[in-house]
Image: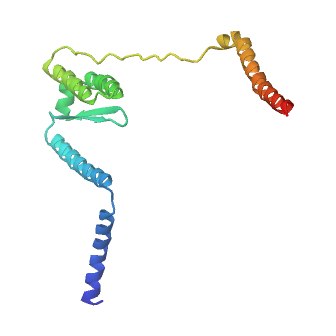
Amino acid sequence: MSETETLSNQTEPTRRTSTSISSLSESSLAKLMLLSMLTKFWRNGILQLKRGNNKGIVVLITSQKEGAITGGPAFVQAVGEAVLDATVSENLPVLATDEKYNEAIFSSAKRIVAAIDGLPDPGGPKVNENKRESNFKTKEETDEKRGQFSLVVGGLLVIAFVVPMAQYYAYVSRK
């Protein structure tokens, strides 16, 4: 294989890559950049977490409306499993469901700090029960007024057929 063929084989994939990158939309490129940044942040966070056993990370996944808290052994012991479990099951999903992401992280941090400082647990957020009432009529209400509806619909059908026939008869009888 000659030197020219080797160089052309090496540059060809680069050209394909540059062609494919230029054909990407701006949003796709932004997603790739964000993914790269998040990957770097996550790697650095995990490395720091492994170096220090008294550090922790709170992760909130907005698309899934859930989160996780992890940390070194000293962090988990200082906070306590009960507070960690309660925070993950109460604070993060409840507030993420209401799309209050900043408040979810802030209230989780307050609970963790209170546990580390030995203060009483401030507790999770109150769950709003949004009961939506149906605007459909019940079967009994529908059955009660069925006769009235039948009379109205029947009357409209009769009018729809009789009026055009009467108009046609009047038009034909004048000639």
Q: Position of residue 128 (x, y in %)?
A: 37, 16
Q: Nearer the viewer, residue 51 or 127?
A: 127
Task: Locate residue 78 relative to residue 139 in the image: left or right.
Answer: left
Q: Position of residue 88 (x, y in %)?
A: 31, 27
Residue at left offset 21%, top offset 50%: 40
Task: Locate residue 40 relative to residue 5 in the image: left or right.
Answer: left
Residue 52, compared with residue 174, is above or below; it is below
Which quadrant of the rendered structure holds the C terminus? Answer: top right
Q: Nearer the viewer, residue 65 or 163?
A: 163
**Quarter residue 172 falls in:** top right
| Residue at the farthest bottom position | 2
The colour mode here is rainbow
Q: Position of residue 147 (x, y in %)?
A: 74, 12
**Quarter residue 6 falls in:** bottom left
Task: Locate residue 48 relative to residue 161 in the image: left or right.
Answer: left
**Quarter residue 117 falls in:** top left
Task: Locate residue 71 relative to residue 12 in the image: left or right.
Answer: left
Which quadrant of the rendered structure holds the N terminus? Answer: bottom left
Residue at left offset 33%, top offset 59%: 24
Residue at left offset 28%, top offset 22%: 82
Q: Position of residue 122 (x, y in %)?
A: 22, 15
Q: Nearer the viewer, residue 72 or 126?
A: 126
Q: How many marks?
A: 0
